[in-house]
Each structure stands twice: as C-alpha cells, then as structure tokens.
Image (cartoon, helix red, strand yellow):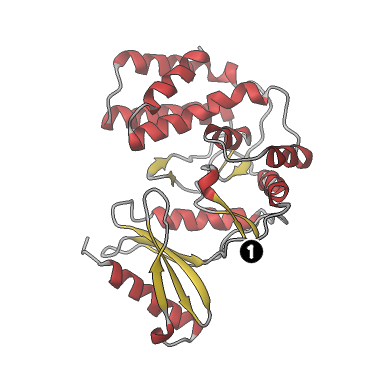
C-alpha cells in the first residue's frame, strides 16, 4: 500500500465534498477530534455543513465499507427515537487506507429525556427481524473479523461463529493453553442446553458500549456498528459489560420490548464473546475474565 499522509487523505475528502456540494475547496477547514480507540478522525467544515472523517491505515481496508453497511441496516430499522449518521462516502482502494466520511453530529446541549429515547430506540432496532442468524457478509468488531454466515439455529451460531471462531483466532495469535481450549470445547458442546430459550433473529448494533452511542442535537445516535442478526440479549450483555447505560435506559427498553424470563442469567455467557475479543485485541486480564465466565457455565 502506498503511504498517504494525513494531509493528503483530508484533502482527498475535501475534494470529494466540494464535488458533491458544489463548494470551493478553499472554503473548507479541518481539525483533529477523537476517533475512538483505533482510528484517526477530523472534523471538516464548509458552507454546506460539517462532516466527520475517520480512517485507519493499519486496519483491514474494507472495515469502513462494512461499517457503512451496518449504519444503513440500522437506518432501515426506522426507529423513531434513534439518529443514525448519514454516510457521505466510504472508500477502499489499493493505495489508500479505508476511510469513512459521515455527517457530523453536533453534541446536544440539553439531553433531558434522552435516556428514555435511547432505551426505546434500541428496543425498536431489535424489532427488525431476519429469517436466520447472521448478516449479509463478514464484518468487524473492532478489527476482529466476524463470521456472519447465515445459520438457522442460534446456539449453533453463537457457539461456532462467535465463541469457537474467536478461540481459534486467539490460539493462532496469542497464548492459549491446550487445557483452556478444552474448556471452551466443552462449553461449545453445552451451548444448546445453555441457550434453550426461544429466540428470533433481531438486528443488533453488535458493539454497543457507552463509547458507541452519543447524545446529539438531533437526539440519541448510534455509531461504529458491528451489526448482525442475533438473539437480542447478545446486545444487552455488551451494554452491561462496561456500564454507561442508566436505569432509565433499561426501564424504557423493557417498556418498549419486554425481555424473556431468565435473560439476566444468560448475560454473562453473552459477555464471554466480548471478553475474548478484548483479549484478542488488547491482551491483559481479559483472557482470565473470559475463562472465569466459561467455567461458570460448565
């Protein structure tokens, strides 16, 4: 891949915006803002409005194309409470890093009632259904490739496409003992028993922690998705893993789309995938945390 400087990437996007909105490139300005854990980001301003650009020269080049597709799928859920940012341009070419250009979402000044709107919006997202579990193509949670092959059976999908798949990725890139692998093998075999409740394929954000929603001037917004169709309780596990969602969010969700009996007992099992993913991405104590969860369910 040819090296493109930050200045060149920004200029390329300014030229694209100038072409779309009929503005002079000289009328644009930009400055760096937070891009999350792994990405570079800038805010681009012009007479036509403000835009958010992010890119990552070390991530898979199609990562932002997959994010574009996830944002579009969430938009199609047609929630009356959620804002999904509009994609202006996503790009993957041989000599450029993956990049994503979005509308800029102005932070809210007054967030009164937003917790309830967020809870109801997430519930409405989960009301969007499919005929099987999975998604139209592989995508990424962070930079981890997710196998979204359509599967009719949820325990099989969670066991094979999520837990066993990521255990194999960890085994090839980090340390995992034979003994630990055997524990995960036993857990995978038990999955039909552990997840015997009735499930339907619901659209989930897929990586919904406090850093992936924001309160904007237009309302609560979801960003940085890793979408697929799953048991909706999978989403709740990630929401609880690091906190950041108020009692009002949870109450509003329950009012909009009540959960099945026993969901709290399954939450830790669903958190296992995200602990394993964090161990794959960052190392540290996440591997130990994941193993404690696995042992709880054996």
**Position in image of residue 5 (x %, y %):** 25, 67
Assign the N terminus to one quadrant of the image.
bottom left
Q: Where is 161 relative to 262, above or below?
A: below
Q: Where is 210 relative to 294, above or below?
A: below
Per the image, the residue denoted by label 1 is 217
> At 45% across and 14% down in the image, what residue appears?
186
> At 45% across and 77% down in the image, what residue appears?
17
**Position in image of residue 129 (x %, y %):** 66, 44
> At 69% across and 27% down in the image, what residue appears?
198
**Crowdedness near tag 1: few (<14), some (14–19) or many (≥20) residues, C-alpha within 10 Å:** some
Query: Is there any visible trace of residue 236 in the rendered image?
Result: yes
- Nearer the observer, 296 or 34: 34
- Nearer the observer, 115 or 82: 115
- Nearer the observer, 76 or 130: 76
Query: Is there any visible trace of residue 161 in the rendered image?
Result: no
**Position in image of residue 184 (x %, y %):** 42, 19
> Secondary structure under badge 1?
loop
Residue 96 lies in quadrant: bottom left
**Position in image of residue 152 (x %, y %):** 58, 33
> At 39% across and 86% down in the image, what residue appears?
26
Q: Where is 273 relative to 63, above or below?
A: above
């Amino acid at each position: 891949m040819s090296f493109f400087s930050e200045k060149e990437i920004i200029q390329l996007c300014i030229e694209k915006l100038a072409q779309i909105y009929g503005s002079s490139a000289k009328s644009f300005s930009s400055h760096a803002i937070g891009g999350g854990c792994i990405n570079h980001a800038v805010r681009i301003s012009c007479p036509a409005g403000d835009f958010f650009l992010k890119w990552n020269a070390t991530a898979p080049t199609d990562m932002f194309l997959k994010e574009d597709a996830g944002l579009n799928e969430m938009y199609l859920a047609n929630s009356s409470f959620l804002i999904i940012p509009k994609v202006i341009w996503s790009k993957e070419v041989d000599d450029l890093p993956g990049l994503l250009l979005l509308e800029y979402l102005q932070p809210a000044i007054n967030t009164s009632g937003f917790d309830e709107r967020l809870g109801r919006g997430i519930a409405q997202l989960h009301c969007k259904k499919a005929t099987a579990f999975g998604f139209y193509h592989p995508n990424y949670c962070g930079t981890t490739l997710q196998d979204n092959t359509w599967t009719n059976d949820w325990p099989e999908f969670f066991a094979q496409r999520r837990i066993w798949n990521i255990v194999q990725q960890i085994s090839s890139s980090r340390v995992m003992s034979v003994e630990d692998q055997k524990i995960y093998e036993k857990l995978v075999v038990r999955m039909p028993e552990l997840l015997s409740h009735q499930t339907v394929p619901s659209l989930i954000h897929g990586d919904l922690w406090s850093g992936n929603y924001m309160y904007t001037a237009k309302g609560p917004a979801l960003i940085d998705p890793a979408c697929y169709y799953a048991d909706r309780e999978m989403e709740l596990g990630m929401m609880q893993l690091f906190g950041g969602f108020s009692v009002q969010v949870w109450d509003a969700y329950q009012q909009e789309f009540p959960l099945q009996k026993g969901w709290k007992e399954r939450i830790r099992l669903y958190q296992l995938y995200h602990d394993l993913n964090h161990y794959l991405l960052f190392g540290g104590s996440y591997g130990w945390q994941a193993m404690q969860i696995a042992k709880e369910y054996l």
